[in-house]
Every structure is written in structure tokens, then in C-alpha cells.
Amino acid sequence: MGVKTLNIDLLCCDSIDFSYLDSWLHIAVTPGIEELILSPPLPTISVYNFPCSLLSNGSGNSIQYLDLCHCIIRPTAGLGCLRSLTRLRMFCVRITGDELWCLLSNCSALVSLELRYCNEIISLKIPSLQRFRLLDVVVCDSLQVVESNAPNLSRFYYSGILCQISLGGSLQVKTLRMICLYQANIVWYARHSILSLAPNVETLTIASPSETVSTPMLSGKFLHLKHLEISLVGKAAYDYLSLVSFLEASPHLEKFELSIKQHHMEHDSILGGPSHDLRQILEQRYDKLKNVKISGFCSSKSLVELTCHILENTTSLDCLTLDTTWYLRCSVMKSGKCYPLMDRDSLVEAQKTLLAIRRYVVGKVPSMVKLNILEPCSRCHTVEPLV
């Protein structure tokens, strides 16, 4: 009696008789319990079927946090009211979209929902929950529709294959993150659709494979966007200068971060190319942008053009950081080594990048702007400098 938190972690166990697990839960889950965290054994032959009866007859009224992993849950219309539940997390849980709707409809106090690898959900619909604020959806492979009717949703994180998304035109969504590493054109999608999806977004994060298409110019404005982070992964040639369209559409942008992750540069280098003339874009003024960081900076001509454009048109800039790497440095790794280590081709490209920075960028940096140039870690990497 009096158990407030029950955490059962059996992920590394085998030969567990599920009837014992049922008994433990029925003993401990009584009125007054506040947190239930359940991780049954990894499914091999059979999958644990979570007994929804635990949540009926008043036993679920006091639960504030429910965390289920590697199990089946089949809630029905007879499920009791989970009036105290504020946080719900499901990891590799077998539940359909209709069943989840049934569960959520009984959670009037719910604030946060996190779904990871729940592959039976085809259509995710969030009821009109007044207190609901945070929605995280990570790699639910069967998902085709995400629809939220919660009027106060403020943060939406999505990772996986892009699907049909509707947030009900919520004006409260301030933080939006779209991670779609196996699907191209996400930057294009962001530029075309996010204004209608979350018109008042303040922090926007996009991660996508590099695309051969450039970012389009549109007339709409991100009037509230203050922090923009774009991550491009892969080796397709990308016109980085086209990202100017995001800057032009974000008049109140204060921080811009661009991360480029590629093992071998596929872009035209500004060093040794047929022409070193930098393209010019019609003059723009960015009078709110203060901090710019580009990780994975390389000698790509279009990337140098983007950097020079920012320097020449940003009157408010305080700091520019150009990191010639994109790995985790040894200073933050428990192993004491950078990860992943750069191969020789990447190290040679980093040296070319330093030369390009000195030749084309340094001279354009105003005296009041702090320029940080980060080289490969000399402790973990050694390469002969270019002359």
C-alpha cells in the first residue's frame, strides 16, 4: 500500500512468466499511485499484453506519468478516466490509432505525449485537450496522418517519413522540429508548408538529406521566427546560397545554425574551379541576426557565397562560427576521443576549407564581429597543412 512510483525494467530478462508480471501490477497499481513505468522483456516469441483493467475502477485516477515499452495495449470504450495523467510515453507499443484516440479521450489533463516506433498507428489524431502542449512522434513507420485538435499545442517534434500533418492552425506552436533523414525535399516542404502549419513558430529545426534542388523563394514571412537550425546530410550537391530565402523570410531571426554532414564533398570547390567570381544577390538587410554558426563548413563555392552574403548584409551580427568538422569532439566524449574520426580525404578538405576562409571570408568580417574558426582536433587528427 502507498506505492507512488513503480518502475519495472525487465528488458534484459528472459523466461519471464507474464502471469507473475500481471500479479505484481495488480498488487502495486492501486488508487494513489502516481507513476507507472513498465519495460517487459524484449519480445521474442510473445509480447506482453498490458491489462487495461488496471486503469479502471478508479485505480488509474491518480496516475500522472505512464511509460510503456515493448507491449500491447488495447484500450476500449469502457476504459476508466485517467483524470490525473499529464505525461504519456510509448516506445515500441502495439496500439492502433483508434485505440490511442480512445485512451487520449479519457486524459483531460494530458500535457505531453511521446510516441516512438509505434508501428500500428496509421492515423494519429489528438482530441481537443485544453492542457495539451507537447507532441513528439519518432519513426512510427505506418503513420500516414497526424492531426491535432489541441488548441494550445506549443511544441511539435516529428521524425520519420513525412506524412500529412495538420495542427489545426494552432497559433500557439512556438517550437517545431522536423527530422526526415531518409526523405528528400524536406527543406522545400518547410519553406512551402510550415507557414500554414505553424504560422507563429519561433524555433524551427529541419534535418534532411542534401538535395540537388535549391530552396525556393516565397513571399510569405516567418514573422516570429528567432532561431533557425538546418541540418543537411549526405553528398548531393546543394546550392547553399539558396538558403538566403529563409533569411529574407525571417525578419526577426536572431540565430542561424547550419550543419552539413558529408564524408566526401560533392560540391564545386571555390579553390581550383573554373571561376572564382562570387554570385551576388539583390541587397538585403538583416538587422536582428546576431549569431551564425556553420558546422561542417567546406570549400563549397555556394557555401562561401552564403557566408559572404551574410557578412555583407547583416548589420547586427555579433558572432560568426565556422567549424570545419561536424563530429563530436573529444572534450565532450567519455572515451576521450573524437567521434567519428575523420578520414584522410576529410582532413585534406578541412585544410582546403581553412585556405578558402582565409582567402574569401576573413577580409569581409567587420571589426565588431567575433570570428571563430574551428579546425580538426590536433589531438585526434594529424594532417600536413596545405601551403
Image: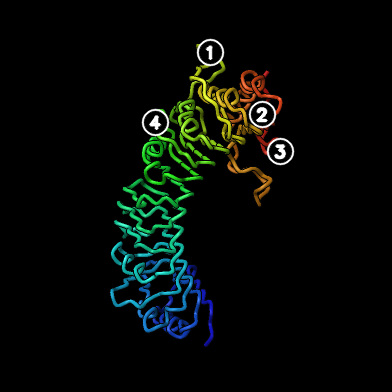
Badge 2 local density, few (<14 within 10 Å), some, or many (20+)?
Answer: few
Indicate the position of residue 139 as horizontal and vertical percent values: 40, 52
Q: Nearer the viewer, residue 317 or 158?
A: 317
- Pointer 4: what residue? 218
User: How far is mark 4 from mark 2, CA to CA?
Assistant: 44 Å
Name the front one of labels 3 and 1: 1
User: How far is mark 1 from mark 4, CA to CA?
Assistant: 26 Å
- Pointer 2: what residue? 383
User: How far is mark 1 from mark 2, CA to CA?
Assistant: 29 Å
Residue at left 50%, top 32%? 247
**Element carrying mark 2:** loop
Cβ atoms under marks 3 and 1 closer than 8 Å: no
Query: Which comes before the other along the chain, label 3 or label 4?
Result: 4
Determine which of the numbered discs, if any, sits on residue 379 in the image.
3
User: How far is mark 3 from mark 1, CA to CA?
Assistant: 36 Å
Cβ atoms under marks 3 and 2 closer than 8 Å: no
- Does residue 96 appear to the left or right of 83 in the view shown? left
Can residue 74 be spotted in the picture? yes
Residue at left 69%, top 31%? 370
**Element carrying mark 4:** loop
Indicate the position of residue 336 as horizontal and vertical percent values: 68, 48
- Pointer 1: what residue? 277
Which of the 4 image quarters holds residue 286? top right
